[in-house]
Image (tube, rainbow, N blue to C red):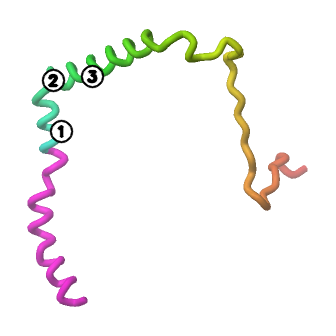
């Protein structure tokens, strides 16, 4: 076990040097390709709108009342908070 830990601690500075600047390099790379990133973003928004318009009208049933019901349940053994003590 000691040999394993000694080897990993010796490799640690090398690994940190190699991977330490990775996030900064990624951000710099993305900022360097602004037009490409904005183009991909615009294409995704366009695809979203296209699919929104292309979904058949019958996909949502006519009986839909357009309201949402939410239910919450306390875990077993919990008691409902009633308010501050009097």
In the image, residue 35 sits, relative to residue 74, either above or below, namely above
Residue 30: x, y in percent? 16, 33
Q: Nearer the viewer, mark 2 or mark 1?
A: 2
Alpha carbons under labels 2 and 1: distance apart: 14 Å
In percent of the image, x 80 and y 49: which residue is there? 81
User: How far is mark 3 from mark 2, CA to CA?
Assistant: 9 Å
- For disc 1, the neighbor class at 10 Å (few under 14, some 14 to 19, many from 20) is few
**SS for callout 1:** helix
For label 3, the residue is 41
SS at mark 3? Answer: helix
Residue with the mark numbered 1: 27
Q: Nearer the viewer, residue 25 or 82?
A: 25
Residue at x-position 9% and y-position 67%:
14
Relative height, residue 71 to residue 85 (above, below): above
**First along the sequence among labels 2 and 1:** 1
What residue is shown with label 2? 36
- Whether tag 3 and tag 2 are in contact, CB under 8 A, the answer is no
Residue 48 colored in magenta in the image: no
Q: Read off the magenta span.
A: 1-24
Q: In the displayed structure, does residue 62 sit left or right of residue 39?
A: right
């Amino acid at each position: 076990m000691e040999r394993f830990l000694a080897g990993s601690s010796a490799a640690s500075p090398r690994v940190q040097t190699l991977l330490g600047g990775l996030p900064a390099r990624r951000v710099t790379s993305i900022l360097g390709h602004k037009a490409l990133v904005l183009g991909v973003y615009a294409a995704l928004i366009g695809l979203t709108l296209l699919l929104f318009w292309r979904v058949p009208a019958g996909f949502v049933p006519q009986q839909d009342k357009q309201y949402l019901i939410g239910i919450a349940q306390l875990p077993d053994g919990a008691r409902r908070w009633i308010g501050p003590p009097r």
